[in-house]
Each structure stands twice: as structure tokens, then as C-alpha cells.
Image: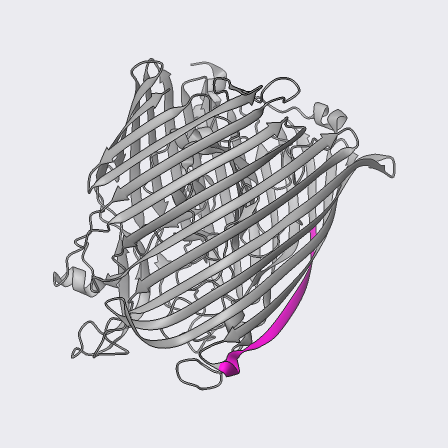
Amino acid sequence: MPNHLRLKVCALVIVHLGWTPSSAQTSSSAQPPEIAASPSPSTQSELPTMLVTGHYDTAVGTSDAASEGVAEGSALQDIPMLRPGEVLETVPGLVVTQHSGDGKANQYFLRGYNLDHGTDLATFVDDTPVNMPTNAHGQGYSDLNFLIPELIDQISYRKGPYYPQYGDFASAGAVDIRYRDALDSNIANITSGTYGYYRALFAGSCTVTELTCASPSGERSGPDGSGLRVLGAVELLEENGPWTLPEGLRKVNGLVRLSGGTAATGWSMDAIVYAARWNSTDQVPLALIESGQLGRFSALDPTDGGDSGRDVISGEWHMMDDAGYAKAAFYLEHYRLQLWSDFTYFELRPATGDQFEQEEHRNIFGGKLVKGWNQTLLGRESVTEVGLQIRHDNIDVGLVDTEDRRVFATVSNEIVDETEAGLYVQNTTFWIPWLRSLVGLRGDQISMDATSLSTPRNSGSASGSKLSPKLSLIFGPWDRTEFFFDAGKGFHSNDARGVIDRVDPTTGLPASSVPALVGSFGKEIGVRSEFVPGLQSSLALWSLNSDSELDYNADSDIGSTSPNAASKRHGVEWNNHLIEGKHLLVDLDLAWTHARYAEENQNGELGDMIPNAVGKVGIFRVTLQNFGPWTFGLETRYIGPYPLSQDGSLTASSAIVTNLRLKDEITHRVSVFLDVLNVFNRPYYDIEYEQDYRVTPSSPIVPTGITVHPGEPREFRVTLSVKI
């Protein structure tokens, strides 16, 4: 065996044996903060980077933290996925699950946060924010079901509040998803699977020059970028899932993308139309499943479900030259959501059941301006960037009591105007060949105005502001190894109703208001190395403190506020990406987190454990490519046990899921994919909660039960993919 191969094998063995309280992270994209402008050509040429092709673009010298990185869109073609939102699992340490119907936003877990449906994880698609403040269901709600994975070019991720260009919801991290400008070939994908799964995707692109449409190409047209690139896609999907109550998910999704110019100077515009409706099997009592009184995939309320939709128009323009760079982006969006849920069954209203409807319609507009200058500072190469961001949401949001989706009482009904503005400045300076720094300062202001149509006393206004300093120091590289120190402040906004409400809309009692903005502080030390040829490894040790865990309890049928206590988290992440020739890709990402409330016996409960704070996460992927017409991809995801109650008396079980993808390229234009999801048919739970409930009108209330949403059993999906 050659020596370099022995080194790789030894490194992988060490990784496999290293599942102790330690874990992983990867690297990053070679971009100064906003656009792909190299901060210093001469300095960059001195960095001993290594050209590799694989799932990640995380070479030494390309990031500002060990936990920063870029996942290539090509990786998504090798990874079997149950849901669109699972594209985020290419972010090391991030787990995506579901506790309801598949048309609803996923549950996200990162760095010991149960991010609910998006709080503390800022997500963007082509510069358009996905998070929804003052959402009907959950603060920072991030519904990624409109994503089309085949069109994704890159997923760049940054963890921790160290980056000046990210504001609201970015304490645990931020993810930028970029769509492609053009496809290598027009495609028609038809998928059929178990449990009534059917999906059709038709996507194509061309370059329009002098009223003709040239053949598709993944490259920008011409050396000068001449010609208009047009990309279009239509996706149709339906499925029932394994549920006793068929899910009946129906989804229609469309995208048109126009672009022109080059990577240096160019522009793009997107138009997105998305609509979905579904029935949902929400979480149910674990005791009923274990006793056999309820089937594993059965619902207690057969009328739960929802519908959602969004219409987006967005655009960006960018420019880069020797003097610096600039970027401008805008977005306009209409979003709607209706959810019928029932988590306590007959506890609150024995006569009708506890179902409730959360509904909203919102219009959003916003954008950003970024300007960067290449310069010298004290005789050293330096880049200074200034950015301005603004967003306005006009929201009609309500909560009503329902029975079989029929409204019989209004809990709350508000019209909310919410405006956020952020201004930041950052400087990157290359002081000596082995030291560069990034220093930034961000200021944010939020204003909220609410008109309560149901409880006039809850009408009012509020505002808040935060100043967030940031610092990163990058040392090296030495022997293809570099070291990082990062620190910074961040924040998330609270639901405007929790900030402004003066009375509980259900009881009429005084409400406990929360601040408009909740601060956080994080720091990290890390290392990234390519010392072993073909193996990229990174190790990050981090901590993250938050002034408050959450805010307005929108995921409730009583509409009350529940501000939780301050928290402290620290952890270790260890990420490894191996490329062996042109055949073998191996990714192994491990994460360990210790999460606690800052003080014991807070929130009216004993103990200091944070419910649903996942402590251990591991993802292992192996891809075998170019074996004649065959490609093989295998992924195993591990989620460790986590506390369900603050005193630690209730604990969720661990979950291991393995998915498989086998591709046969029959001809240059025709391929067949076989996906086997949950290959070993392991029973597991996507999510577990501590929950009080009553399952019938006459049964006793269970004050500290456990409710669960089962993970799906083994499924088969076959896709015929034709390049046109």
C-alpha cells in the first residue's frame, strides 16, 4: 500500500474511533464576505491551497473560522433525501427532522439548539431571507419546502455570531443557498415511490443571443458574458406517506431565473411560485403507541393539516474589479400559511377538542447594498466592506379555536408592521504572511407596530436596538494547516405579540412582555488541516451564551408568552472530508454539545437542562463514483439521546437512520436512480417532547407525558432522469 494511502486510512480509523465528546466542522468558501472577490491576489497566491473536487469546497486559506464552509450542489446529486429541507444536512452538525406534515417547516437542530422551525439559524435563498419574524406558528419560521435540490449550485454556511453581514436569527449560524444560472443539460425527472410518492421535475436553460436560444451550458456565455441566460423549472409532487391518515401532500413549484454578465460583473433575477396543502399526523402520546392502543403511524385528530404558499420576485447585481467590489439585492414576497394542529387533544376543551388554527398572510420587501474597497492599511493589504440591509414585513396574523377545521372562537387577530434595518462595517487585513484579522461592527434597529382587532388593549408599538462587535484572527498556514480565533455578539428578534401584548388574549390576565431583541455572545477556537493529502479536517471548540431561550409561544393554543431563562452552551465539532482519486468520497462529521440554563430552577421548573437540546450528532457519507455507469451513495445519520424535561427525568431515545442511493447511467442522456430511505427499517422518532395532554374527554390529564412523531419506515423511490 502506498504511504499516502496508508496515511488516509489511518486518519479515517482515528476518526471512527474518535466518537467521544468531540466533533467536527469543515471549512469554507474562498469569498470575501459578500461576493466572490479575492481580498488580495498576491497574498492568496502564497497560500498552499489544494485543488480538490468533491462534496465540499473547504480548502485551507478560504475561510475566517474552522466552522465555516461551502457544500457543493453536486453533493446533492449523490445524497438520498426524504425531504427538500434535508439539503441543510450538508451543513456539518445540522439535523433536519419533522414533527408534523411534510408541507410544514422542518425542525432544525444545531449546536445544542432546538431551533424550532428556524429561530437562531438565518437562512437565505439567492439573498432572500427565509425566516419569518412574528410568524403564526413559530418565531423565525423557515419553510424550505419550495427548494428544488437539482438547481442548487452552492450552500455556504457560517456558524456562530462572528460575521458582520448577518443579523437577526444568526446566533447559531447562517446558511446561504445559491441557485445555478444555467444547467449542463435540460432535464426531465420522473419519480415514483412507495406510499403514493410521485414527483415530476422539468428544468432547462439556454442563452438567448440575437433572438436565438443556444444549447444549455453550465458555463457563463462568452468571455464577456454576452447573452441572456434563462433557467426555468416546474416541480409537481404528491405523496401520502406511511400514515394511517393519508398525508395527501400536493405541491406545485415553479422557478424562472434570468441572468447575465460574468462572475466579475453580472446580475440575476428570480421569480418563484409555490403552493402546497396537506393533512398531518402530529405528534401523539408515546404511551398509546407502546400499549398498542394507537398504531405507530396513526393520528389522534384526523383533521389536522395545512396549506402554504409563497410568491417571490428577487434580483441582484454585482461588480468586482481591482479597486474593490459592490453588490445590490432586493426581494418582494407574498407569503401565506394556514395550520390546523392539536397537541393536547381534550385537555383544554373536552367538548370540542383542542384543535386550533394559526393563519397569516404577509407581504415582505427588502434588500441590501454592499460596497468593498481593496486598499492598504499601515502598509498592509486590506479590504474594507460596508453594508446596509433593510426589511419590512406587513403581517395579518391570527390564532383561532377550531373543531374539524371549523372556527368557533377567536383567540387573537393582529395586523403587525415590522421593520428591521442593519448597518455594518468590517475590515480584513493581511498583517504578515501568517496572520490576518477580520474586525467588524454591526448595528441593528427594529420597530414594531401592532393593531389588535380582537383585544384592543394589545395594540401598540415597540422598538429595540443592538450593537454587535465581531473579531476573527486567522493564523497560518503552516504545513497546510491554519488556526482560528473568533468571537462576536449576535441576537434574535422576538415575536411582536410577545413584545407588545399587555394582556393574555385567552385569560385577560396581565401578560409578561419580552424584549424586542435578545442578545447572544459566542466564541470559537479551531484548526483546519490538509496535511494528509486528499483529506480535509477541521476541529472547532466553541461556546455560545444567549440572554433568553425563546419568546412568544406561537406554537400553542393559548397564545401566551413564555420567555425562558438565559442559557449557556459549549461544544466540539470535528469534520473530515476525504477524496481518494476520482472514485471515493468520504465525509464524517461529528458534533458534541453541552447545553444548560445559566442558572438552576428557572422558568418555574427544577433543574437546569434545556429540553430538546441535542447533545450528539454524527453523519457519515460515502460515495463511490465513476465505476463504469454506476454511482453509489450511502449516508448514516446519528442523533444522540437528549433531555425532554428541565430536571432531566425524561429523555428522548437516540436515532440512527441510513439512506442509500444507487445510480445507473444507462446512456449519456438516460439515468435511473434508486433511493432506499431507512435502509434497515429501523424504528425511530423524528422528534419527542414532554407534553401534558388528555386523550379522551373523560380520561385523566397526563401532566408530564411524552409525545412523539415517528420517523418514516423503509421507502423505495425510483427516478428516471432524461437529459434533453
Q: Position of residue 485 (x, y in %)?
A: 66, 45
Residue at (71, 51) in percent of width and height: 424
Residue at (60, 66) in percent of width and height: 517
Total labels: the figure holds 0
Q: Residue furthest right?
A: 378
Q: Position of residue 122 (x, y in %)?
A: 53, 51
Quarter location, residue 718: top left
Which of the image's four quarters has the N terminus? Answer: top left
Q: Is residue 241 above or below residue 415?
A: above
Residue at (68, 26) in percent of width and height: 47
Q: Residue furthest bottom?
A: 509
What is the image's colouring? one colour
Question: Magenta stretch: residue 56 in it?
Answer: no
**Bounds of the magenta span?**
456-470
Residue at (43, 47) in percent of width and height: 144
Q: Is residue 626 above or below residue 303?
A: above
Q: Position of residue 167 (x, y in %)?
A: 62, 54
Q: Is residue 145 visible?
A: no
Q: Residue furthest left?
A: 292
Q: Is residue 125 visible?
A: yes
